[in-house]
Image (cartoon, helix red, strand yellow):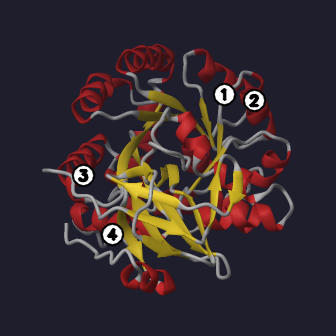
């Protein structure tokens, strides 16, 4: 399938984030990249032109695939809806956080393989650069060969390790009602769910060797990997030592501080910033940001939180807009080694987010120079301006 680009154009009149500063500079787009030279103009006076948002971890797709636990929809339907949800919120590149767990159901290896296949089949028809992040439970030792085969087959480039077994054991022992609800979601009885937990627990002595095997394979394959929900510095240090350098959602300051000490990037949830704290009672992201213990923000479960978090940091006096926006664009690009995006510069991909400076609403999103979202006054400017830009049916 050949790549189709929109006609060349120049965005003028807006305040643009370039070279780490907000500037009154135009942005030329040609052949899907940031260009130079005189081109047909679109007047975006009153708007901000910012680098497209890069989301390293989001599971909002789960609500599009199964809006209710008992009402699943086809993966293709959910992925198309996710694509549009991301675009409407200024997201140009996004990793969908898909579990690979002993828990079964939508978190099972079978479900992960189905998701990988669906995304691979649809990728050429999606507007956003959607990719898959695998959240691998540490106690899935017997799936090693299957996991590595899937990573190779589908070109998975990002994996994080989880260990939610202790949480499951606590649930089983102290909160039987929640255990029953958890079991029901997977179509099991509480007794069957407990048996599954016990089977996973028996793998504990094999887990260190399993993780080292995966780490060695990931290094060979060029897969970026890290860990999720580190509860303390000791856990983060163990993961860092095997090469799992990305620290995703540390639940305590000590875990984030250890990551900073060994130069491991720390990711936190944008909803945590917008809401003023963690919905699960863990450390507040803004506390880590104020202490320079957080490198990037991710959507977690809500795409609108990304842009809103950046503006919240500005409004609260934590940092200026260039620094705040870098946490959802330039820094994620650096962490995943995406050298072609994350900033607005000549030769980079034309991945852009156009925001109404007054309302702070995303009114246009461009991915490699193609409009993936267009609404409001920006739509009139694009469609009625000198550029005469038409939305292509692609």
Residue 209 seen in render: yes
At x 70%, y 37%, the residue is: 231
Task: From the top left corner, tell me how far across and down residue 225 is, in percent.
Answer: 49, 29
Q: Circle 2 sits on which residue? A: 260
Residue extending farthest front: 38
Q: In whole angstroms, how far apart are the C-alphas of marks 2 and 1? A: 6 Å
> Is there CB contact under 8 Å for labels 3 and 1?
no
Q: Circle 1 sits on which residue? A: 264
Q: Circle 4 sits on which residue? A: 81
Secondary structure at numbered mark 3: helix
Q: In whole angstroms, how far apart are the C-alphas of marks 4 and 3? A: 13 Å
- The dot on residue 148 is none
* Crowd class of label 3 (few under 14; some 14 to 19; many from 20; radius 10 Å): some
> Is there CB contact under 8 Å for labels 4 and 1?
no
Q: Is residue 78 left or right of residue 245?
A: left
Q: In whole angstroms, how far apart are the C-alphas of marks 4 and 1? A: 33 Å
* Crowd class of label 2 (few under 14; some 14 to 19; many from 20; radius 10 Å): some
> Is there CB contact under 8 Å for labels 4 and 3?
no
At x 40%, y 21%, the residue is: 218
Earlier residue among tags 3 and 1:
3
Residue extending farthest left: 1
Q: Is residue 156 left or right of residue 159?
A: left
* Foreground tag (4 vs 3): 3
Q: Circle 3 sits on which residue? A: 123
Task: From the top left corner, tell me how far across and down residue 26 is, in percent.
Answer: 56, 62
């Amino acid at each position: 399938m050949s790549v189709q680009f929109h006609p060349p154009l120049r965005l003028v009149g807006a305040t643009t984030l370039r070279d780490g500063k907000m500037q009154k500079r135009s942005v030329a787009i040609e052949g899907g990249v940031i260009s130079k030279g005189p081109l047909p103009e679109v007047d975006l006076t009153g708007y901000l032109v910012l680098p497209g948002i890069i989301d390293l971890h989001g599971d909002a797709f789960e609500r599009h695939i199964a809006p209710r636990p008992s009402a699943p929809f086809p993966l293709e339907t959910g992925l198309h809806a996710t694509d549009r949800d991301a675009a409407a919120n200024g997201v140009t590149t996004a990793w969908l956080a898909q579990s690979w767990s002993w828990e079964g159901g939508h978190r099972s290896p079978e479900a992960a393989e189905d998701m990988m296949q669906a995304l691979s089949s649809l990728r050429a028809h999606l507007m956003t650069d959607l990719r898959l992040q695998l959240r691998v439970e540490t106690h899935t030792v017997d799936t090693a060969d299957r996991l590595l085969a899937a990573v190779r087959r589908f070109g998975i480039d990002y994996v994080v390790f989880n260990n939610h077994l202790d949480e499951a054991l606590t649930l089983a022992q102290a909160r039987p009602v929640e255990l029953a609800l958890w079991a029901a979601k997977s179509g099991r009885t509480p007794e069957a769910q407990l048996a599954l937990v016990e089977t996973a627990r028996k793998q504990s002595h094999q887990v260190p060797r399993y993780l080292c095997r995966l780490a060695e394979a990931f290094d060979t394959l060029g897969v970026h990997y890290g860990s999720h929900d580190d509860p303390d510095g000791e856990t983060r240090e163990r993961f860092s030592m095997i090469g799992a350098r990305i620290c995703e959602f540390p639940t305590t300051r000590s875990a984030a501080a250890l990551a900073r000490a060994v130069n491991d990037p720390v990711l936190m949830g944008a909803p945590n910033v917008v809401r003023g704290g963690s919905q699960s009672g863990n450390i507040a992201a803004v506390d880590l940001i104020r202490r320079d213990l957080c490198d990037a923000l991710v959507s977690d479960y809500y795409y609108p939180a990304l842009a809103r978090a950046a503006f919240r940091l500005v409004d609260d006096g934590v940092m200026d807009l260039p620094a705040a926006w870098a946490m959802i664009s330039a820094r994620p690009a650096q962490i995943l080694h995406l050298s072609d995006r994350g900033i607005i510069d000549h030769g980079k991909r034309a991945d852009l987010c156009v925001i109404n400076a007054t309302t702070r609403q995303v009114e246009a999103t461009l991915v490699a120079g193609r409009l993936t979202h267009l609404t409001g006054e920006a739509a009139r400017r694009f469609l009625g301006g000198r550029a005469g830009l038409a939305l292509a049916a692609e």
